Image (cartoon, rainbow, N blue to C red):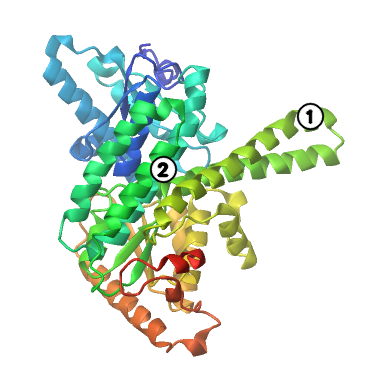
Amino acid sequence: MGASNNGNFDRLTGVKQFDVTGKVLLIPDMAPFAARALAACFRAVGVNARIMKTYDGLALGKEFTSGKECFPCQVTLGDILSFLKGEKERLGPAFKPERYVYFLPEADGPCRFGMYNKMQRLVLDRFEEFRDVPITYVSTRNSYSADAIMPPKASSIFRKLSYAAIIIADIMDRTVWRVRPYEIRQGITDSFMEKALAAVMEEIEESGASLKLKKLNDLTEDIASTAATFIDTRKPRRPIIGIVGEIYVRTHPDSNQQIARLVERLGGEVVIASIAEWINYITYDMARDQKRLLRLAWLNRDFASVRELAPKFTATQIEKYYQLFRQHRSYSRALKHLDIQKDHRIGTLEKRLDRNNLYNFDVGTEAGLSIGAALEQVHEGFDGVINVFPFTCMPSAITTAVLKPLLNRMRMPYLDAPYDGAIQPNREIALRTFMYQAAQRRESRIAGKNRNDRRHVIPDNDHKRDSSGGIPDRNSRGSHP
């Protein structure tokens, strides 16, 4: 399918959903483990998916944007332009733009993310040689269903498999963050996890289509048990830093200038909000909307709408509980060997927001997740919170407005970390100051010096962890937060 150059409307038809089987599906990089696991899931159902090299094309992305766009828009635009230019140079006359499809999901709501693919379509159309590269997507409007981009049977398999793969990718991330600060030999964790990712991808491609997920969970347990042996138990537990914020920048190491590694270098241990958290939220929010519409239809005696909505609401509820079940199955295997942080339940986050009248999920965006997650991290005994986001991000500005004064009253170290590709001259100084505060908070909690401030500071949770940095005793794992 080619995109015409006869007016905006025709050009925008280059962003549509269609069967991508037989095409080369180009996926922007984001969270390194999750993106590659997702590509493997596509390949498992017969779609030739490739992860594009990322961030090298940032100058191109900035060249064709005004600076008013969200930073991830510039990064992903640079990635696709750089990739296509490289392919054209490599293949010469054999370059056929119609064999590629650019995959860029979208979201419904006030965030600019929902317009990335439309804007990028206009940019691609400025290049004669790239006008026939279509853009396809999945959307939050139907909980990222893949029904419109592949055959029904493949779509059903892909939906279950990709969710399971993202859970495993989240666990791999959390394994790295738990082990790397305490590793017995520098670099051993990253080296091992690179091989582990290759094994996970191979397993997904070989057996994923059968949905025999026990093999993937077995592999997850093997990864966690092996990584646990890399911990030097003589090293004391570090301050634990929760990272929340906009999903792309917080999980894309180049966009956030390797903030996880920098926090580790400055003496901390990080836990970044997961990819699955966002997917769970989309399903949870869809169920909330359906429940509201169902209630209104019942009150209005609109029984035709009730009959239409009831099966959809039931299906969404089943999906919601399936997601919880799948997370439990995978996390429980890893937790046998390593005390990684479990994921937050979306319902728990909503209750925490409602309890203090801080925010409402009806407003939408990631702000509710970030605010709720930060408060849960206070409850779980974390020592600091960093809000990572693109410069000028509206949901993250809301998060800052709520969290900054609130956590200050709770005496919880908090730091805003906006990114637009530039290196902020005071970045490391700000992080060093933040980490000093986090270390003080940890020492204070452990020493019990904050007992007179129970109204604001949640009781220490370290009795549920091995403060030596080692693996907790098997008999204590049942109390893991």
Q: Secondary structure at mark 1?
A: helix
Q: Amino acid at mark 2?
A: Asn
Q: Nearer the viewer, mark 2 or mark 1?
A: 2
State the image quarter where residue 36 is shown: top left
88 up-or-down from 258: above or below: above
Q: Residues within 10 Å of mark 1 (few under 14, many from 20)?
A: few
Above or below: residue 237 compared with residue 254:
below
**Residue at image point 37% right, 72% down:** 466
Q: Amino acid at mark 1?
A: Arg
Residue 317 visible in this rendered orientation of the protein: yes
Residue 290 x, y percent position in the rendering? 68, 39
Residue 143 located left or right of residue 223:
right
Query: Which residue carries the number 1 mark?
Result: 307
Name the residue nearer the viewer: 415 or 379: 379
Q: Which residue is mark 2?
A: 217
Say which residue appears at 20% left-offset and 36% top-offset: 57
Specify the quadrant of the image occupied by residue 83: top left
- Give the mark count: 2
Residue 289 spot, x, y in % from top left: 66, 42
The residue lying toward the viewer, choosing from 268 and 249, is 268
Q: Please identify the quarter of the rendering in which residue 348 is found.
A: bottom right
Residue 233 numbered mark, or none: none
Task: Point out the image quarter for the N terminus.
Answer: top left
Residue occupying image coordinates x 40% and y 37%: 215
Q: CA distance from mark 2 to mark 1?
A: 39 Å
Q: Residues within 10 Å of mark 2 (few under 14, many from 20)?
A: many
